[in-house]
Amino acid sequence: KATKATKATKASYLISEFQPNPTGLLQDSQKIELSGPPNTAFEGCIWSVEADGLATEEGAAAAATSFGMVNRINSVWGTFDANGLLAVTIPELENPSFTLFLSQSCPTGNVNINDNTAALLAAVQTIYDSIGVPDSVADANNLPLIRTTLDNPPGTDLGYIGGQPKLVFRDSSSGALYQVDDQGSASPSSVFDAHGTQMAVAEFDPDPRQTSFGVINPTRFSAMADIVGDPHIHTLDGGHYTLLREGSFLVWHFGLPQPHVDWQIFAHYAGRQSFTKGLLLVDTSGSEPSSMEITSERCEWQTQSNSKKWSSEVPEVLLSGPSSRMQLVGNKNRNRIELFIADEKVATLKVLCRQGRHIDMKLYMTNQKWRPFVSGELKGQKGQKDKPSSNSSMLQLATREDQEFEVKKAWAELGGSPRAQEYLQMFDENGHDVGLSELCDAQGQADAKALCQKHLGTAAHSSYFEECIYDVCSGAGEVAAEMAAEMLKF
């Protein structure tokens, strides 16, 4: 599987796109695309370290002249364009396996990284980014040794995909790395994520199997978005931010003109920590609307169909329009709602509710073709996403107010029940903002970090980890960490 370094970059320079072995034949040169601040000049160095030939009982001699050797060194320079892209030309890289580095300065020569590591690191100064590319399972396991030897620079070691990738690129929206395999003329190429998991080509726009040096890379319409904690919103375009406002908001709207399908999901954020206290699903596809709601008061779904009374007797299938339906699967605390058009599943909503505390939710969409029909907080805003700074701490989470998605109507006017409206109003009247600095000193931050590490484990270098620390430190306690961890597995 792919492994990530533990240190963050000191500047926003990244390797954006390259071909590890452009044609399978030796060429004079190749292009590598970098990303950085738009309209700024750049000078740096691209170099690679050999990952083949690690010592074994049979191959110790090969390791002495191969594994760990710096075998390509190229000074590069230029100006990032208005999109923050710079395509540079260098002599062709040696075939994988290797780790490719982007740094402030160049190594002094073709040395082995194990011989004088301190001198090498001093020579290159800042390492901005690095990508490890394996051509075998064994080499995939060896790549982390290069990273640890060089003091864990920022970057990613790719998972093995059955051969050398012919193309590696970053998603233009989320920054996630993807790799394209090389099937030659036998069959169309496939796309894999950094871990080596195959992705559906149809989820990308444009086709990710072609190079795009000097123009914006393809982006994947993510299958997942979620709202966790206070509330931290992860969008379908790969963005993530913390909402600063309380009240009712349009989380997700799906509107299809033909056949007519209209689904809306509203959330109410309230309390001292503005956690999700209520969710409301409204289906107006048919002549009579249908609604489903859940609040943290009882963590039980209530339904209303055809303007009848609210009921806790939730049918397995709610039929609304002639072509759409909502289907509920799950138990009291963990629920899954599947949304269909005819027999095709469009989306799945997963809800985790802890009575007396709050609600977390996760939304999966099945296909990029539905993207034009989506709006609301979870859609995201490509090109305008807020992200933590590269050395972010919990005090530097990206934030928004989402005023364009706030709805001023009362909960019952949106389609919710009078009982839920009364419950949510109680939080609105008693809630008040408390700054993080007022609640959590340095020791408190350290304790929160340890607690989140305990529950989130492998997510300890993700935005979810930062958000968990924020919630625990804000007074939400261990329950917030437990629910965040459970939601990631849900």
Image (cartoon, grey):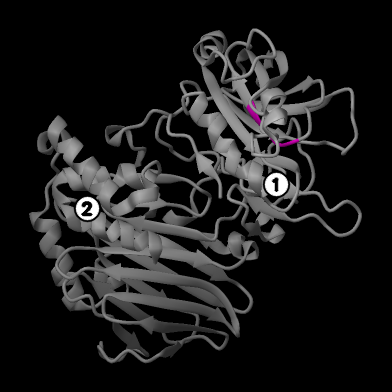
Q: Residue furthest left?
A: 430
Instruction: Please give left or right for residue 21 compared with residue 123 in the image.
Output: right
Dot 2, crowdedness within 10 Å: few (<14), some or many (≥20)?
A: many
Residue 59 versus residue 10: which sits nearer the camera? 59
Look at discs 2 and 1 and give the one toward the viewer: 1
Given residues 156 and 415, the one toward you in this image is 156
Q: Position of residue 94 (x, y in %)?
A: 78, 28
- Residue at numbered disc 2: 274
Magenta: main secondary structure equals strand
Query: How far apart are the alpha carbons under marks 2 and 1?
Result: 48 Å
Query: Judging from the image, what secondary structure is the residue with disc 1 in?
Result: loop
Disc 2 marks a residue whose amino acid type is: Ser
Residue 93 belongs to the span the image colors magenta: no
Q: Which residues are magenta?
A: 96-100
User: Mark 1 sits on what residue?
Assistant: 136
Residue 458 is marked as none
In the rendered view, does 192 fall on the left or right side of 401?
A: right
Type of amino acid at the residue the image marks with label 1: Ser
Q: Position of residue 31 (x, y in %)?
A: 78, 27
Horizontal side of 4 relative to 265 (left or right) equals right
Query: Vertical placement of 70 versus 22: above or below?
Result: above
**The C terminus, quarter of image:** bottom left
